[in-house]
Amino acid sequence: MSRADLKIHRRTFLALGTGAAATLAMPSLAFGASPVRTETGRAFGTGWQVTLPAGKDFAPLRGPVEALLADIDQQMSPWRADSDISRFNRAPSGSVGFPAPLTEVASAAMSLARASDGVFDPAVGPLVARWGFGPIAGDGHPDWRSLKVDADAVSKSHADLTLDLCGIAKGYALDRMADLLENRGHSDFLIDLGGELTVRGIHPSRRHWQAGVEDPRPEFSGLVEVLRLDGLAVATSGSRANSYVLGDRIYSHIIDPTTGEPVAGKLASVSVLAENAMTADGWATALMAAGAANGPSLARRNGVSALFLLREGEGLHRITTGAFMDYLA
């Protein structure tokens, strides 16, 4: 079966061998019992899905998983007026105390901002809102260098600075879900949180877990690549799922901090493989913001394994960096 024959339209990354995709990934199992069981839920305005070998009991995990995600949402969601991050964004200049998970993610965001020369900008929230994609109000220009993260607090040098962790927090939540399952004795599983995936171990059919990269162009459906995941996480950033069109321009929810505008140009999506989901999530956001001209070189400088999909006439042009090619199935 060719990649062109894999016609699935659901989200950017699709787990192959689970749910409706099972007969495509494993035709020999089409008429037999499924080798996996899948549990689903909702969090962060999206869905999550945990895939385990058939016979494994997920019931004792549902409560802890939901509590974990609710706690992260309470801390890091800018859509909630009562969240810790919203409290910081309303605060005057100075330091605001935070729980350890939030400062851990904020510290990772600041490290990524430095590594990407500010293309990933945790202070970009007001610009995102200005273009209709986010809830963080404010008139200040993004200035991530004026934020400071300590072990138990985040501080800002002036009141109109805000903090937005949406480009990295979902990956953090995915990592914590994986930790929870491992700590409860599960060694083989795939987790999908809003289209970002992380895996442990192997599929019950004794192969690696697989994922499909969806065509990022709204006028097309199907997969453009299939990945072999081997203990890795994968995340994508693109304009397909969260954008709007005015005239002949697509306005993406990813903002280029250097221009203050949604990313423009030929770059349709960036997919990143990494050892943890927070890294994959953050770099996918950063490289999409960097655009077609600067994204590949930024990825190479930082050793990031990425797939860039660029619109080229009626087709797609692929650019890979790092070890991404090694994981194509």
Image (cartoon, helix red, strand yellow):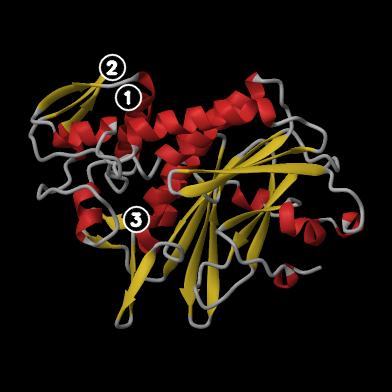
Q: Amino acid at mark 1?
A: Thr
User: Crowdedness of circle 1 by 10 Å Cα count: few (<14), some, many (20+)?
Assistant: some
As drawn, the label of residue 289 is 3
Residue 263 spot, x, y in % from top left? 32, 63
Q: Residue at x 79, y 62 (%)?
A: 24
Asked if the residue at tag 3 contacts the one at tag 1, i.e. Cβ–Cβ closer than 8 Å, the answer is no
Check disc 1 and report the residue beneath it: 103
Cα gap from disc 2 to disc 3, whole angstroms: 29 Å
Residue 90 spot, x, y in % from top left? 14, 36
Cα gap from disc 1 to disc 2, whole angstroms: 6 Å
Q: Secondary structure at mark 2?
A: loop
Q: Secondary structure at mark 1?
A: helix
- Please tell me whether mark 2 or mark 3 is closer to you in this view: 2
Instruction: Report whether 123 appears left or right of 16.
Output: left
Asked if the residue at tag 3 contacts the one at tag 2, i.e. Cβ–Cβ closer than 8 Å, the answer is no
- Please tell me whether mark 1 or mark 3 is closer to you in this view: 1
Instruction: Report whether 248 appears left or right of 237.
Output: left
